[in-house]
Amino acid sequence: MPTNPLIHQLGQTLRELGQHPYPHVPNPPGCKKRAAVALIIRVRPTFPDQGFFESKSCGPEAGTKNQRLENFFAQEWVQRGDPEVLFIKRAARDGDRWTSHIAFPGGRRDPEDESDSTTSVRETKEEVNIDLSADHALLVGNLSERVVTTWLGKTPLMVLCPFVYILMRFDSESLALQPSELSWQNPSEKLILWGLTLGIMSDFLRLLPSCDTTKLWTWPTLSPLDYRFAIWLCTYAYRKQKTREMALGSPANTNGTARSSGPGDIDDTTFTTFEARSRKEIQDSALLEMLGGYYDRAKVAVVLTLLLRVGAGGLLGTWGYRRLRDRAKL
């Protein structure tokens, strides 16, 4: 059976990610909250009797992080396997803004957490019972940290820190889900990513070969048709320019895709197979590159739409007032 070329590309990307960490982002003035999430990768073996952890060659005693990754990806069952990434689906609850949200395990940093990565380890253990501090789990590196703000971008809410882990065994511990946070999901259901989850996944896919992340998402907008049209019109030239820049900046051809890993998934926690791409020298956020300047134009569109609404309301009110006045004179 031939080896999976995706595995070689993934291994190279993870090694380079570990050697080139993204810079630490401090909290802005007046914002004390930090949060961390874990993007967890594992390899699904071709045959169920494979996927065991080789502690001597892949464990902490094997040497450096880079050496452990090289040994892991050199294994035959890994080279013939399919890489997967873990998502969770939060429970559907009325009044919850995050209802049914597809996300990565993670949460807010507690005062007792030593670091942001400690938060990702603790939250993952609490949410899905995966111990990222175990010998078979390796912290590869981090992705671009970002300041999460309100929709208009004026008020910082927290700093979000994504970390990339790889599980060096497939037969890991059983996943335990919190009923208050997670619910059952059909494994064949198509995953729709949005918001921060999409941003983080796009950042990771940009590190892999020929991934045009602009095709993984749609530009944010508002529901009312007049707002939507105004935003579309005011951002049209900007969107075309940014899409062209991103396309020129990455070797195009193949689109990033994601699919459910099929039967055997447990509850609402889903390991999703992703198609490979190769490493690019990128040190910023994919979505921040796309959205830098977009929201400024969207704000202008919102203001213009409000002014048009007020103007239209004033004209309509004036017309109605004159009609009533003319009828009163008759």
Image: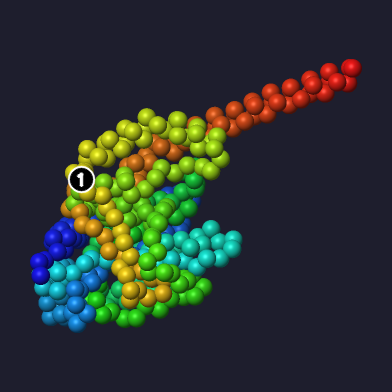
Q: Nearer the viewer, residue 10 or 216?
A: 216
In this view, 268 is above or below 101: below
Displayed quadrant of residue 270: bottom left
Along the horizontal axis of the image, is 241 left or right of 310?
left
Along the horizontal axis of the image, is 90 left or right of 266?
right
Residue at x 33% of width, y 33% of height: 240
Q: Where is residue 326 in the image (x, y as percent from the top left)?
A: 84, 18
Visible residue check, residue 201: yes
Q: Position of residue 163 (x, y in %)?
A: 30, 62
Q: Which amino acid does label 1 sit on?
A: Asn
Q: Which colour scheme is used?
A: rainbow
In this view, 75 is above or below 295: below
Give the residue number, with chain letter if any, for mark 1. 253
Q: Where is residue 258 in the image (x, y as percent from the top left)?
A: 30, 59
Q: Position of residue 261 (x, y in %)?
A: 30, 68
Residue at x 14% of width, y 74% of height: 77
Which SS class for mark 1? loop
In this view, 248 is above or below 170: above
Q: Residues within 10 Å of mark 1 (few under 14, many from 20)?
A: few
In this view, 116 is above or below 122: above
Visible residue check, residue 123: no
Number of numbered discs = 1
Q: Which of 162 and 109 is in front in this view?
A: 162
Along the horizontal axis of the image, is 26 left or right of 324?
left
Displayed quadrant of residue 312: top right
Along the horizontal axis of the image, is 330 left or right of 297?
right
Residue at x 31% of width, y 44% of height: 214
Q: Quarter holding the N terminus?
A: bottom left
Q: Quarter holding the C terminus?
A: top right
Residue at x 12% of width, y 77% of height: 57
